[in-house]
Amino acid sequence: MNVRTVRDGDEPAIAELFNEAYGKYGGFVPRTAEYWRWCCLERPDVNSDGIFLAYEDDKLCGYAVVGSSGNIWEFCVAENNKEAAEALMFQALNYLEQFGVSYVNVSIPMDAGYADILRKVGFGEVLAKEMFVTTLSPAKLIEALVTSKRDFFAKLEEDFGFKLREVPFGVSEEFLVKIHEASVCVAEGSAPNPSVYVELGFQDFLSILFNHSSLTRLFLSGKMKVKPLRKVSSVFSFFSNLRLTNSWFFPLSDFI
Amino acid sequence: MSSPIIYRTLREKDEEAVKRLVESTFLFLPMGRFWDWKYLRNPGFDRSLVAVAEEGGKIVGCNHWLPRKVKITDSIVVDSMLGANIAVAPEYRKKGVGRELIYFLRSQHIAKKPSLMYMFTDSELRKHFHAPVAGYVPAPGGTVWYRKILNWNKVKTSVADFNERVKRREFGDRLAQVDLTIAIKPLNTPTLCLHLSKEGAEIIPSAENADVKISSYGAVFSKVKNGHNGTWILIRALLTGRLKLKGSLRKIWAVYRNMWAFREILSGRVT
Protein backbone atom coordinates (compact mmCIF):
# COMPACT_ATOMS: atom_id res chain seq x y z
CA MET A 1 0.00 0.00 0.00
CA ASN A 2 1.46 3.34 -1.07
CA VAL A 3 0.07 6.63 0.15
CA ARG A 4 0.93 9.95 -1.44
CA THR A 5 -0.57 13.44 -1.53
CA VAL A 6 -2.73 14.66 -4.38
CA ARG A 7 -1.26 15.95 -7.65
CA ASP A 8 -2.68 17.90 -10.55
CA GLY A 9 -4.56 15.54 -12.82
CA ASP A 10 -5.67 13.12 -10.07
CA GLU A 11 -9.20 14.55 -10.03
CA PRO A 12 -10.86 12.28 -12.67
CA ALA A 13 -9.61 9.10 -10.97
CA ILE A 14 -10.74 10.38 -7.57
CA ALA A 15 -14.21 11.28 -8.87
CA GLU A 16 -14.48 7.86 -10.50
CA LEU A 17 -13.50 6.09 -7.27
CA PHE A 18 -16.01 8.13 -5.26
CA ASN A 19 -18.88 7.33 -7.63
CA GLU A 20 -17.96 3.66 -7.71
CA ALA A 21 -17.45 3.26 -3.96
CA TYR A 22 -20.79 4.88 -3.12
CA GLY A 23 -22.63 3.57 -6.18
CA LYS A 24 -25.24 1.65 -4.22
CA TYR A 25 -26.26 4.63 -2.08
CA GLY A 26 -28.39 7.66 -2.72
CA GLY A 27 -28.21 11.06 -1.08
CA PHE A 28 -25.00 12.54 -2.45
CA VAL A 29 -23.81 14.67 -5.31
CA PRO A 30 -22.19 12.40 -7.93
CA ARG A 31 -18.65 13.64 -8.42
CA THR A 32 -17.23 15.12 -11.56
CA ALA A 33 -13.62 16.31 -11.66
CA GLU A 34 -14.85 19.93 -11.69
CA TYR A 35 -17.21 19.49 -8.74
CA TRP A 36 -14.61 17.61 -6.71
CA ARG A 37 -12.00 20.30 -7.38
CA TRP A 38 -14.32 22.99 -6.02
CA CYS A 39 -15.73 20.85 -3.23
CA CYS A 40 -12.41 19.55 -1.86
CA LEU A 41 -9.31 21.06 -3.42
CA GLU A 42 -10.53 24.68 -3.22
CA ARG A 43 -12.18 24.32 0.20
CA PRO A 44 -10.85 27.05 2.53
CA ASP A 45 -9.36 24.69 5.13
CA VAL A 46 -7.91 22.18 2.67
CA ASN A 47 -4.40 22.19 1.24
CA SER A 48 -3.10 19.73 -1.28
CA ASP A 49 -0.77 18.28 1.38
CA GLY A 50 -3.91 17.26 3.33
CA ILE A 51 -5.34 15.11 0.54
CA PHE A 52 -4.02 11.56 0.70
CA LEU A 53 -4.35 8.92 -1.99
CA ALA A 54 -3.81 5.22 -1.34
CA TYR A 55 -2.57 2.97 -4.14
CA GLU A 56 -2.42 -0.78 -4.38
CA ASP A 57 -0.48 -2.11 -7.36
CA ASP A 58 -0.65 1.35 -8.94
CA LYS A 59 -4.45 1.38 -8.67
CA LEU A 60 -6.16 4.08 -6.64
CA CYS A 61 -8.00 2.29 -3.84
CA GLY A 62 -8.83 5.11 -1.46
CA TYR A 63 -8.39 8.74 -0.57
CA ALA A 64 -8.98 11.14 2.32
CA VAL A 65 -9.53 14.88 2.17
CA VAL A 66 -8.40 16.30 5.50
CA GLY A 67 -9.17 19.88 6.51
CA SER A 68 -7.16 21.83 9.05
CA SER A 69 -10.45 22.43 10.92
CA GLY A 70 -10.42 18.76 11.96
CA ASN A 71 -12.97 17.58 9.43
CA ILE A 72 -12.15 14.70 7.14
CA TRP A 73 -14.34 15.96 4.33
CA GLU A 74 -14.16 12.81 2.27
CA PHE A 75 -12.95 9.39 3.35
CA CYS A 76 -13.44 6.92 0.59
CA VAL A 77 -12.05 3.44 0.05
CA ALA A 78 -12.76 0.94 -2.70
CA GLU A 79 -14.61 -2.22 -1.73
CA ASN A 80 -14.27 -1.55 1.98
CA ASN A 81 -10.51 -2.01 1.70
CA LYS A 82 -9.52 -2.07 5.37
CA GLU A 83 -5.83 -1.79 4.71
CA ALA A 84 -6.37 1.40 2.72
CA ALA A 85 -8.74 2.75 5.39
CA GLU A 86 -6.15 2.17 8.11
CA ALA A 87 -3.29 3.70 6.12
CA LEU A 88 -5.36 6.77 5.19
CA MET A 89 -6.61 7.32 8.72
CA PHE A 90 -3.07 7.05 10.05
CA GLN A 91 -1.96 9.76 7.59
CA ALA A 92 -4.97 11.93 8.38
CA LEU A 93 -4.42 11.85 12.16
CA ASN A 94 -0.71 12.44 11.71
CA TYR A 95 -1.40 15.42 9.45
CA LEU A 96 -3.89 16.96 11.87
CA GLU A 97 -1.41 16.93 14.77
CA GLN A 98 0.24 20.13 13.50
CA PHE A 99 -3.01 22.13 13.69
CA GLY A 100 -3.75 21.47 17.36
CA VAL A 101 -7.43 20.78 16.68
CA SER A 102 -9.53 19.29 19.48
CA TYR A 103 -11.37 16.71 17.43
CA VAL A 104 -11.56 14.87 14.13
CA ASN A 105 -14.92 14.35 12.39
CA VAL A 106 -15.66 11.95 9.60
CA SER A 107 -18.83 10.48 8.10
CA ILE A 108 -19.02 7.02 6.60
CA PRO A 109 -21.82 4.76 5.36
CA MET A 110 -23.62 2.90 8.13
CA ASP A 111 -22.63 -0.47 6.67
CA ALA A 112 -19.00 0.42 5.88
CA GLY A 113 -16.81 -2.61 6.45
CA TYR A 114 -13.99 -0.50 7.87
CA ALA A 115 -15.95 1.10 10.74
CA ASP A 116 -14.07 -1.12 13.23
CA ILE A 117 -10.79 0.52 12.11
CA LEU A 118 -12.22 3.89 13.17
CA ARG A 119 -13.34 2.54 16.54
CA LYS A 120 -9.96 0.95 17.05
CA VAL A 121 -8.18 4.28 16.72
CA GLY A 122 -10.55 6.02 19.12
CA PHE A 123 -13.46 7.28 17.03
CA GLY A 124 -16.95 7.12 18.51
CA GLU A 125 -20.33 7.62 16.88
CA VAL A 126 -21.84 11.02 17.50
CA LEU A 127 -25.21 12.58 16.95
CA ALA A 128 -25.00 15.10 14.18
CA LYS A 129 -27.03 17.06 11.71
CA GLU A 130 -29.36 15.00 9.62
CA MET A 131 -30.49 15.27 6.04
CA PHE A 132 -34.08 16.23 5.27
CA VAL A 133 -35.91 16.34 1.98
CA THR A 134 -38.94 17.94 0.43
CA THR A 135 -40.17 18.78 -3.03
CA LEU A 136 -41.63 21.74 -4.86
CA SER A 137 -43.15 19.45 -7.43
CA PRO A 138 -44.49 16.06 -6.31
CA ALA A 139 -45.30 15.36 -9.97
CA LYS A 140 -41.67 15.86 -11.05
CA LEU A 141 -40.44 13.67 -8.21
CA ILE A 142 -42.82 10.89 -9.19
CA GLU A 143 -41.79 11.31 -12.83
CA ALA A 144 -38.13 10.88 -11.91
CA LEU A 145 -38.88 7.73 -9.94
CA VAL A 146 -41.14 6.26 -12.58
CA THR A 147 -38.42 6.32 -15.23
CA SER A 148 -36.52 3.53 -13.51
CA LYS A 149 -39.61 1.37 -13.12
CA ARG A 150 -40.84 1.14 -16.68
CA ASP A 151 -41.01 -2.66 -16.48
CA PHE A 152 -43.33 -2.61 -13.52
CA PHE A 153 -45.64 -0.03 -15.04
CA ALA A 154 -46.02 -2.12 -18.15
CA LYS A 155 -48.26 -4.36 -16.04
CA LEU A 156 -50.48 -1.60 -14.66
CA GLU A 157 -53.36 0.22 -16.35
CA GLU A 158 -54.67 3.07 -14.20
CA ASP A 159 -55.35 6.79 -14.13
CA PHE A 160 -54.30 7.91 -10.69
CA GLY A 161 -55.52 11.25 -9.41
CA PHE A 162 -53.60 12.45 -6.36
CA LYS A 163 -54.66 15.17 -3.98
CA LEU A 164 -52.21 16.26 -1.29
CA ARG A 165 -53.38 17.97 1.87
CA GLU A 166 -51.41 20.61 3.80
CA VAL A 167 -49.05 21.38 0.94
CA PRO A 168 -46.35 23.96 1.68
CA PHE A 169 -46.33 27.31 -0.10
CA GLY A 170 -45.70 27.03 -3.84
CA VAL A 171 -46.52 23.32 -4.20
CA SER A 172 -49.40 22.09 -6.39
CA GLU A 173 -52.05 20.19 -4.47
CA GLU A 174 -52.97 17.87 -7.29
CA PHE A 175 -51.24 15.74 -9.87
CA LEU A 176 -52.14 12.83 -12.03
CA VAL A 177 -50.34 9.72 -13.20
CA LYS A 178 -51.70 8.03 -16.30
CA ILE A 179 -50.40 4.55 -16.95
CA HIS A 180 -51.52 2.98 -20.21
CA GLU A 181 -49.89 0.39 -22.43
CA ALA A 182 -46.51 0.72 -20.75
CA SER A 183 -46.39 4.47 -21.11
CA VAL A 184 -46.51 6.72 -18.05
CA CYS A 185 -47.57 10.34 -18.10
CA VAL A 186 -47.23 12.48 -14.97
CA ALA A 187 -48.61 16.02 -14.83
CA GLU A 188 -49.63 18.64 -12.32
CA GLY A 189 -53.32 19.38 -12.00
CA SER A 190 -56.47 17.41 -11.37
CA ALA A 191 -57.43 14.34 -13.32
CA PRO A 192 -60.93 14.70 -14.88
CA ASN A 193 -62.01 11.08 -14.42
CA PRO A 194 -59.35 9.16 -12.55
CA SER A 195 -59.81 5.42 -12.18
CA VAL A 196 -58.24 5.76 -8.72
CA TYR A 197 -58.37 8.81 -6.48
CA VAL A 198 -55.81 9.07 -3.67
CA GLU A 199 -55.81 11.73 -0.98
CA LEU A 200 -53.14 12.07 1.69
CA GLY A 201 -51.04 14.65 3.56
CA PHE A 202 -48.00 16.16 1.82
CA GLN A 203 -45.56 14.96 4.46
CA ASP A 204 -47.16 11.50 4.53
CA PHE A 205 -46.72 11.33 0.76
CA LEU A 206 -43.02 12.14 1.10
CA SER A 207 -42.62 9.78 4.04
CA ILE A 208 -43.95 6.94 1.91
CA LEU A 209 -41.57 7.71 -0.95
CA PHE A 210 -38.59 8.11 1.37
CA ASN A 211 -39.46 4.91 3.16
CA HIS A 212 -40.36 6.20 6.61
CA SER A 213 -44.09 5.50 6.72
CA SER A 214 -46.03 2.30 6.42
CA LEU A 215 -48.62 2.36 3.65
CA THR A 216 -50.85 0.00 5.61
CA ARG A 217 -50.77 2.19 8.70
CA LEU A 218 -51.55 5.34 6.74
CA PHE A 219 -54.45 3.63 5.02
CA LEU A 220 -55.90 2.01 8.15
CA SER A 221 -55.58 5.21 10.17
CA GLY A 222 -57.57 7.07 7.51
CA LYS A 223 -54.66 9.37 6.69
CA MET A 224 -54.62 8.02 3.15
CA LYS A 225 -57.96 7.80 1.38
CA VAL A 226 -58.47 5.70 -1.73
CA LYS A 227 -61.56 5.78 -3.96
CA PRO A 228 -62.86 3.34 -5.02
CA LEU A 229 -61.77 1.14 -2.17
CA ARG A 230 -61.30 -1.90 -4.39
CA LYS A 231 -58.33 -0.11 -6.01
CA VAL A 232 -56.30 -0.10 -2.79
CA SER A 233 -54.04 -2.84 -4.08
CA SER A 234 -53.17 -0.73 -7.17
CA VAL A 235 -52.23 2.20 -4.93
CA PHE A 236 -50.15 -0.05 -2.69
CA SER A 237 -48.28 -1.57 -5.59
CA PHE A 238 -47.77 1.88 -7.15
CA PHE A 239 -46.13 3.28 -4.02
CA SER A 240 -44.31 0.07 -3.09
CA ASN A 241 -42.57 0.11 -6.44
CA LEU A 242 -41.60 3.75 -6.26
CA ARG A 243 -40.42 4.07 -2.68
CA LEU A 244 -36.70 4.51 -2.14
CA THR A 245 -35.35 1.50 -0.33
CA ASN A 246 -31.64 2.13 -0.61
CA SER A 247 -29.57 3.80 2.13
CA TRP A 248 -28.46 7.38 1.71
CA PHE A 249 -24.93 8.44 2.44
CA PHE A 250 -23.50 11.93 2.43
CA PRO A 251 -19.84 12.76 3.06
CA LEU A 252 -19.08 15.80 5.22
CA SER A 253 -18.10 17.63 2.04
CA ASP A 254 -21.74 17.57 0.88
CA PHE A 255 -22.90 18.85 4.25
CA ILE A 256 -20.90 22.10 4.34
CA MET B 1 -41.57 54.02 12.91
CA SER B 2 -39.20 51.40 11.53
CA SER B 3 -39.15 50.78 7.75
CA PRO B 4 -40.83 47.65 6.43
CA ILE B 5 -38.69 44.62 5.70
CA ILE B 6 -38.20 44.13 1.98
CA TYR B 7 -37.48 40.72 0.52
CA ARG B 8 -35.48 40.61 -2.71
CA THR B 9 -32.71 38.75 -4.49
CA LEU B 10 -29.04 39.30 -3.75
CA ARG B 11 -27.18 42.18 -5.40
CA GLU B 12 -23.43 42.41 -5.69
CA LYS B 13 -23.27 45.26 -3.16
CA ASP B 14 -25.01 43.05 -0.53
CA GLU B 15 -22.32 40.41 -0.57
CA GLU B 16 -20.16 41.71 2.27
CA ALA B 17 -23.17 42.13 4.59
CA VAL B 18 -24.52 38.68 3.73
CA LYS B 19 -21.11 37.14 4.27
CA ARG B 20 -20.84 38.75 7.72
CA LEU B 21 -24.34 37.64 8.66
CA VAL B 22 -23.75 34.02 7.60
CA GLU B 23 -20.37 33.76 9.28
CA SER B 24 -21.60 35.33 12.52
CA THR B 25 -24.58 32.94 12.60
CA PHE B 26 -22.73 29.72 11.80
CA LEU B 27 -19.81 30.09 14.14
CA PHE B 28 -18.28 26.74 13.25
CA LEU B 29 -17.52 27.94 9.73
CA PRO B 30 -14.06 29.22 8.82
CA MET B 31 -14.42 32.99 9.08
CA GLY B 32 -13.64 35.26 6.16
CA ARG B 33 -13.26 32.66 3.48
CA PHE B 34 -16.24 30.35 3.74
CA TRP B 35 -18.96 32.37 2.00
CA ASP B 36 -16.77 33.32 -0.96
CA TRP B 37 -15.85 29.70 -1.50
CA LYS B 38 -19.27 28.15 -0.95
CA TYR B 39 -21.20 30.63 -3.03
CA LEU B 40 -19.15 33.00 -5.21
CA ARG B 41 -16.68 30.35 -6.35
CA ASN B 42 -19.29 27.59 -6.56
CA PRO B 43 -19.68 26.40 -10.19
CA GLY B 44 -23.47 26.42 -9.75
CA PHE B 45 -23.79 29.80 -7.99
CA ASP B 46 -26.64 32.00 -9.15
CA ARG B 47 -27.39 35.32 -7.40
CA SER B 48 -31.09 34.93 -8.11
CA LEU B 49 -31.08 31.90 -5.81
CA VAL B 50 -30.08 33.99 -2.81
CA ALA B 51 -32.77 36.00 -1.04
CA VAL B 52 -32.10 38.82 1.36
CA ALA B 53 -34.29 40.62 3.87
CA GLU B 54 -33.52 44.32 4.03
CA GLU B 55 -34.73 46.91 6.49
CA GLY B 56 -33.83 50.54 5.89
CA GLY B 57 -30.81 49.56 3.80
CA LYS B 58 -29.55 47.02 6.34
CA ILE B 59 -29.40 43.30 5.51
CA VAL B 60 -31.17 41.49 8.36
CA GLY B 61 -31.61 38.05 6.85
CA CYS B 62 -30.61 35.83 3.96
CA ASN B 63 -31.47 32.47 2.47
CA HIS B 64 -29.34 30.55 -0.01
CA TRP B 65 -30.28 27.89 -2.50
CA LEU B 66 -27.63 25.94 -4.36
CA PRO B 67 -28.49 23.89 -7.43
CA ARG B 68 -27.04 20.40 -7.26
CA LYS B 69 -27.52 17.07 -8.91
CA VAL B 70 -28.34 14.45 -6.30
CA LYS B 71 -28.40 10.72 -6.65
CA ILE B 72 -31.62 9.36 -5.14
CA THR B 73 -31.35 5.70 -6.06
CA ASP B 74 -28.54 3.60 -7.45
CA SER B 75 -29.56 4.73 -10.93
CA ILE B 76 -31.50 7.99 -10.67
CA VAL B 77 -29.88 11.42 -10.43
CA VAL B 78 -32.22 14.40 -10.14
CA ASP B 79 -31.83 18.16 -10.38
CA SER B 80 -32.26 19.43 -6.88
CA MET B 81 -31.76 22.44 -4.66
CA LEU B 82 -29.79 22.47 -1.47
CA GLY B 83 -31.55 24.73 0.99
CA ALA B 84 -28.28 26.04 2.35
CA ASN B 85 -27.56 28.74 4.92
CA ILE B 86 -30.57 30.66 6.27
CA ALA B 87 -29.41 33.39 8.62
CA VAL B 88 -31.39 36.06 10.43
CA ALA B 89 -29.82 38.78 12.59
CA PRO B 90 -30.45 37.99 16.29
CA GLU B 91 -32.77 40.98 16.91
CA TYR B 92 -35.00 39.94 13.99
CA ARG B 93 -35.43 36.29 14.96
CA LYS B 94 -38.83 34.77 15.80
CA LYS B 95 -40.57 37.42 13.72
CA GLY B 96 -41.21 35.32 10.63
CA VAL B 97 -38.23 36.63 8.63
CA GLY B 98 -36.84 33.13 7.98
CA ARG B 99 -40.23 31.90 6.79
CA GLU B 100 -40.66 34.88 4.44
CA LEU B 101 -37.17 34.30 3.01
CA ILE B 102 -38.17 30.74 2.18
CA TYR B 103 -41.47 31.85 0.65
CA PHE B 104 -39.69 34.53 -1.37
CA LEU B 105 -37.32 32.08 -3.08
CA ARG B 106 -40.18 29.65 -3.67
CA SER B 107 -42.29 32.35 -5.30
CA GLN B 108 -39.37 33.57 -7.44
CA HIS B 109 -38.62 30.13 -8.79
CA ILE B 110 -42.10 28.73 -8.99
CA ALA B 111 -41.60 27.79 -12.64
CA LYS B 112 -38.35 25.85 -12.01
CA LYS B 113 -39.86 23.70 -9.27
CA PRO B 114 -37.00 21.32 -8.53
CA SER B 115 -38.18 17.77 -7.94
CA LEU B 116 -36.06 17.53 -4.81
CA MET B 117 -35.02 20.03 -2.18
CA TYR B 118 -32.81 18.99 0.67
CA MET B 119 -31.08 20.46 3.67
CA PHE B 120 -29.11 19.54 6.74
CA THR B 121 -30.22 20.47 10.22
CA ASP B 122 -31.08 18.94 13.57
CA SER B 123 -34.39 17.20 14.23
CA GLU B 124 -35.70 19.88 16.57
CA LEU B 125 -35.21 22.74 14.12
CA ARG B 126 -36.72 20.65 11.36
CA LYS B 127 -39.76 19.87 13.49
CA HIS B 128 -40.42 23.45 14.58
CA PHE B 129 -39.41 25.42 11.50
CA HIS B 130 -38.54 23.57 8.31
CA ALA B 131 -41.33 20.97 8.38
CA PRO B 132 -44.21 23.42 8.95
CA VAL B 133 -42.83 25.95 6.46
CA ALA B 134 -41.57 23.69 3.68
CA GLY B 135 -42.74 20.15 4.49
CA TYR B 136 -39.31 18.60 5.06
CA VAL B 137 -39.20 14.93 6.11
CA PRO B 138 -36.17 12.81 7.05
CA ALA B 139 -34.14 11.46 4.14
CA PRO B 140 -33.41 7.74 4.18
CA GLY B 141 -30.77 6.94 6.80
CA GLY B 142 -27.40 5.42 6.15
CA THR B 143 -24.79 7.96 7.25
CA VAL B 144 -22.91 7.70 10.51
CA TRP B 145 -20.76 10.48 11.91
CA TYR B 146 -17.70 9.55 13.91
CA ARG B 147 -15.62 11.79 16.10
CA LYS B 148 -12.25 11.29 17.73
CA ILE B 149 -11.35 13.60 20.56
CA LEU B 150 -7.73 14.72 20.41
CA ASN B 151 -7.75 17.02 23.42
CA TRP B 152 -10.23 18.56 25.84
CA ASN B 153 -9.36 22.23 25.32
CA LYS B 154 -12.92 23.25 24.61
CA VAL B 155 -14.19 21.65 27.82
CA LYS B 156 -12.57 24.61 29.57
CA THR B 157 -15.24 26.87 28.02
CA SER B 158 -18.02 24.46 28.97
CA VAL B 159 -16.71 24.30 32.54
CA ALA B 160 -16.60 28.11 32.74
CA ASP B 161 -20.21 28.31 31.44
CA PHE B 162 -21.29 25.66 33.93
CA ASN B 163 -19.65 27.52 36.80
CA GLU B 164 -21.42 30.72 35.80
CA ARG B 165 -24.71 28.88 35.97
CA VAL B 166 -23.78 27.46 39.37
CA LYS B 167 -23.08 31.02 40.55
CA ARG B 168 -26.47 32.11 39.29
CA ARG B 169 -27.91 29.21 41.33
CA GLU B 170 -29.55 27.71 38.25
CA PHE B 171 -29.09 24.26 39.77
CA GLY B 172 -30.32 25.19 43.27
CA ASP B 173 -28.74 23.01 45.97
CA ARG B 174 -28.09 20.04 43.75
CA LEU B 175 -24.34 20.37 44.21
CA ALA B 176 -24.41 21.23 47.91
CA GLN B 177 -23.10 17.87 49.14
CA VAL B 178 -20.91 16.99 46.17
CA ASP B 179 -17.16 16.48 46.34
CA LEU B 180 -16.16 14.17 43.56
CA THR B 181 -13.30 13.70 41.13
CA ILE B 182 -13.90 11.68 38.01
CA ALA B 183 -11.41 10.64 35.33
CA ILE B 184 -12.85 9.89 31.92
CA LYS B 185 -10.72 7.96 29.46
CA PRO B 186 -12.30 7.07 26.11
CA LEU B 187 -10.13 4.57 24.23
CA ASN B 188 -7.15 6.15 22.43
CA THR B 189 -8.09 9.59 23.76
CA PRO B 190 -6.42 11.78 26.39
CA THR B 191 -7.88 11.53 29.89
CA LEU B 192 -10.26 14.22 31.11
CA CYS B 193 -10.28 14.69 34.86
CA LEU B 194 -13.07 16.77 36.40
CA HIS B 195 -13.60 17.76 40.01
CA LEU B 196 -17.17 18.56 41.00
CA SER B 197 -18.04 20.43 44.17
CA LYS B 198 -20.55 22.94 45.47
CA GLU B 199 -18.50 25.72 43.76
CA GLY B 200 -18.91 24.05 40.38
CA ALA B 201 -16.53 22.09 38.19
CA GLU B 202 -12.80 22.25 37.68
CA ILE B 203 -10.45 20.49 35.28
CA ILE B 204 -7.73 18.65 37.19
CA PRO B 205 -4.43 18.03 35.40
CA SER B 206 -3.78 14.61 36.92
CA ALA B 207 -6.16 11.69 37.11
CA GLU B 208 -4.09 9.94 39.77
CA ASN B 209 -6.33 10.78 42.72
CA ALA B 210 -9.63 10.47 40.91
CA ASP B 211 -12.41 8.90 42.99
CA VAL B 212 -13.80 7.13 39.95
CA LYS B 213 -12.00 6.21 36.76
CA ILE B 214 -14.12 5.52 33.72
CA SER B 215 -12.69 3.99 30.59
CA SER B 216 -14.75 3.15 27.55
CA TYR B 217 -14.94 3.02 23.80
CA GLY B 218 -15.57 6.45 22.29
CA ALA B 219 -18.96 5.33 20.98
CA VAL B 220 -20.18 4.30 24.45
CA PHE B 221 -18.90 7.54 25.91
CA SER B 222 -20.73 9.57 23.24
CA LYS B 223 -24.00 7.75 23.83
CA VAL B 224 -23.86 8.14 27.60
CA LYS B 225 -22.82 11.78 27.22
CA ASN B 226 -25.71 12.49 24.89
CA GLY B 227 -28.10 10.87 27.35
CA HIS B 228 -29.83 8.39 25.05
CA ASN B 229 -31.55 5.95 27.37
CA GLY B 230 -28.53 6.57 29.54
CA THR B 231 -29.20 3.92 32.19
CA TRP B 232 -29.67 1.07 29.73
CA ILE B 233 -26.63 2.06 27.73
CA LEU B 234 -24.63 2.20 30.93
CA ILE B 235 -25.81 -1.21 32.13
CA ARG B 236 -25.29 -2.83 28.75
CA ALA B 237 -21.86 -1.29 28.36
CA LEU B 238 -20.86 -2.41 31.86
CA LEU B 239 -22.07 -5.96 31.32
CA THR B 240 -20.28 -6.28 28.00
CA GLY B 241 -17.08 -4.77 29.34
CA ARG B 242 -17.23 -1.83 26.95
CA LEU B 243 -17.34 0.49 29.93
CA LYS B 244 -15.08 0.00 32.91
CA LEU B 245 -15.45 1.71 36.26
CA LYS B 246 -12.83 1.85 39.01
CA GLY B 247 -13.66 3.29 42.43
CA SER B 248 -15.59 2.56 45.60
CA LEU B 249 -19.28 1.69 45.22
CA ARG B 250 -20.21 4.80 47.23
CA LYS B 251 -18.31 7.05 44.83
CA ILE B 252 -19.63 5.25 41.74
CA TRP B 253 -23.14 5.78 43.07
CA ALA B 254 -22.28 9.46 43.60
CA VAL B 255 -21.16 9.70 39.95
CA TYR B 256 -24.41 8.14 38.82
CA ARG B 257 -26.43 10.55 40.97
CA ASN B 258 -24.51 13.53 39.60
CA MET B 259 -24.45 12.37 36.02
CA TRP B 260 -26.67 15.36 35.15
CA ALA B 261 -23.81 17.72 36.00
CA PHE B 262 -21.30 15.86 33.86
CA ARG B 263 -23.82 15.83 31.04
CA GLU B 264 -24.37 19.58 31.42
CA ILE B 265 -20.64 20.10 31.01
CA LEU B 266 -19.98 17.51 28.33
CA SER B 267 -23.06 17.75 26.16
CA GLY B 268 -22.15 21.21 24.94
CA ARG B 269 -19.40 21.87 22.43
CA VAL B 270 -16.78 19.88 24.27
CA THR B 271 -14.53 19.29 21.31
Image (cartoon, coloured by chain):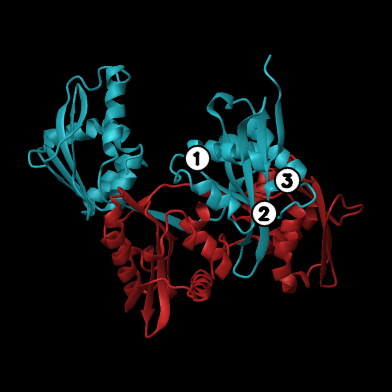
Chain colours: A red, B cyan
The residue at which mark 1 appears reads as: B23
The residue at which mark 3 appears reads as: A200
- Kind of residue indicated by mark 2: Leu
Q: Residue furthest left?
A: B209
**Residue A216 visible to an observer of this rendering:** no
* Disc 3: CA contacts within 10 A as few (<14), some (14-19) or many (>=20): some
Which mark, by number, is residue B116? 2
> At which x and y percent is residue B129?
59, 35
Q: Nearer the viewer, mark 2 or mark 1?
A: 1
Q: Are marks 3 and 2 on the same chain?
A: no
Q: Nearer the viewer, mark 3 or mark 1?
A: 1
User: For the point 15% across and 36% down, which residue is it?
Assistant: B204
Q: Nearer the viewer, residue B116 or A200?
A: B116
Q: Residue furthest bottom?
A: A57
- Kind of residue indicated by mark 3: Leu
Image height of A6 relative to B141, above or below? below
Q: Residue furthest right?
A: A192
Q: Nearer the viewer, residue A196 or A242?
A: A242
User: For the point 48% across and 47% down, which residue is it?
Assistant: A129
* Disc 1: CA contacts within 10 A as few (<14), some (14-19) or many (>=20): many
> At which x and y percent is residue A155?
78, 72
- Kind of residue indicated by mark 1: Glu
Disc 3 to disc 1, C-alpha distance: 40 Å
Disc 3 to disc 2, C-alpha distance: 19 Å
Q: Nearer the viewer, residue B17 or A219?
A: B17
Say whether residue A10 is left or right of residue A198.
left
Say whether residue B85 is left or right of residue B102.
left
Mark 1: secondary structure: helix
**Residue A98 visible to an observer of this rendering:** yes
Disc 2 to disc 1, C-alpha distance: 27 Å
